[in-house]
Image: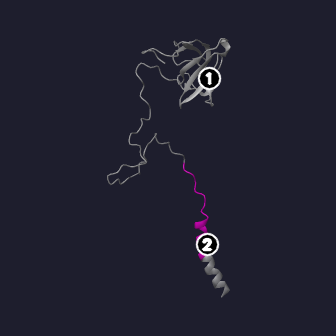
């Protein structure tokens, strides 16, 4: 009688143990990532007159269109650390200049993406440029990476308050 009970219990436990402890399945190769804000192909939503709250109603383009008259934007080759050294010159905006009688104490206020603000003196480095000189109305930078266009200047001067029609 004990053998029959033992066999019955074993017959019930073995199938349950395979469900409780499944074998590791071989991993599939990673698929290509979907574009930004893309909806999966098999996704369906029954709206009943309402929009889907998880899908952006105004999808953003995957690649931004090239602006007319602007040079191509260089991709940073330097690592993007936190702080001033993680900002490219094309991303930086000159917010202001704080002058002092001692020229070594003059600083420039640089606005960065994300609403961050940094202070820089002459000789401080950005990701792709170094501050060369700070004047009351302009800041001069020297590029430290090769430009996209070989005829482009190695030194760039940015105005504190650009006039209409000037690049920032």
Mark 2 to mark 1 CA distance (whole Å): 69 Å
First of labels 2, 1 by sequence position: 2
Residue displayed at 61% across by 69% down: 17
Choose top left, top right, bottom left or bottom right for residue 78: top right
Q: What numbered label is drawn on residue 119? A: 1
Q: Tell me if residue 124 comes above or below residue 23 in the rendering.
A: above
Nearest-to-viewer mark from 2 and 1: 1
| Rendered location of residue 58, percent (x, y) | 38, 39
Q: State the residue lying farthest toward the bottom.
A: 1
Disc 1 crowd, CA 10 A, few/some/many (<14, 14-19, 20+)? some
- The residue closer to the viewer here, 112 or 143, is 112
Specify whether residue 126 is in view. no
Residue beneath the point at 57% across and 52% down: 27
Residues drawn in magenta: 12-28
Which residue is depicted at the point 58% across and 67% down?
19
Q: Secondary structure at mark 1?
A: strand
Residue 129: numbered disc: none
Q: Is residue 34 part of the magenta span, yes or no?
A: no
Picture disc at residue 14: 2
Front one among 92 and 129: 92
Judge whether residue 161 can be spotted in this image: yes
| Disc 2 residue crowd, few under 14, some 14–19, many 20+, Cα 10 Å | few
Could you say where residue 52 lies in the image, as x and y percent from the top left? 39, 49
Question: Who is closer to the viewer here, 2 or 40?
Answer: 40
Q: In x, y percent, where is residue 29?
A: 54, 47
Q: Nearer the viewer, residue 156 or 104?
A: 104
Q: Quadrant of the N terminus?
A: bottom right
Q: Position of residue 26 (x, y in %)?
A: 58, 54
Image position of 41 with respect to 164: above or below: below
Q: Is residue 79 above or below residue 41?
A: above
């Amino acid at each position: 009688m004990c053998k029959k009970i033992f066999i019955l219990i074993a017959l019930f436990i073995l199938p349950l143990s395979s469900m409780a402890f499944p074998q590791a399945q071989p991993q599939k190769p990673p698929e290509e990532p979907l574009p930004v804000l893309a909806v999966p192909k098999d996704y369906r939503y029954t709206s009943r007159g309402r929009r889907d709250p998880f899908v952006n109603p105004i999808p953003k383009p995957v690649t931004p269109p090239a602006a007319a008259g602007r040079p191509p934007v260089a991709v940073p080759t330097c690592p993007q650390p936190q702080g001033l050294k993680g900002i490219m010159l094309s991303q930086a905006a000159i917010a202001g200049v704080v002058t002092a009688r001692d020229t070594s104490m003059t600083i420039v206020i640089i606005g960065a993406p994300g609403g961050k603000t940094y202070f820089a003196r002459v000789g401080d480095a950005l990701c792709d440029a170094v501050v060369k000189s700070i004047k009351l109305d302009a800041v001069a930078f020297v590029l430290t990476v090769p430009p996209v266009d070989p005829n482009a200047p190695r030194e760039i001067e940015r105005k504190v308050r650009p006039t209409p029609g000037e690049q920032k």
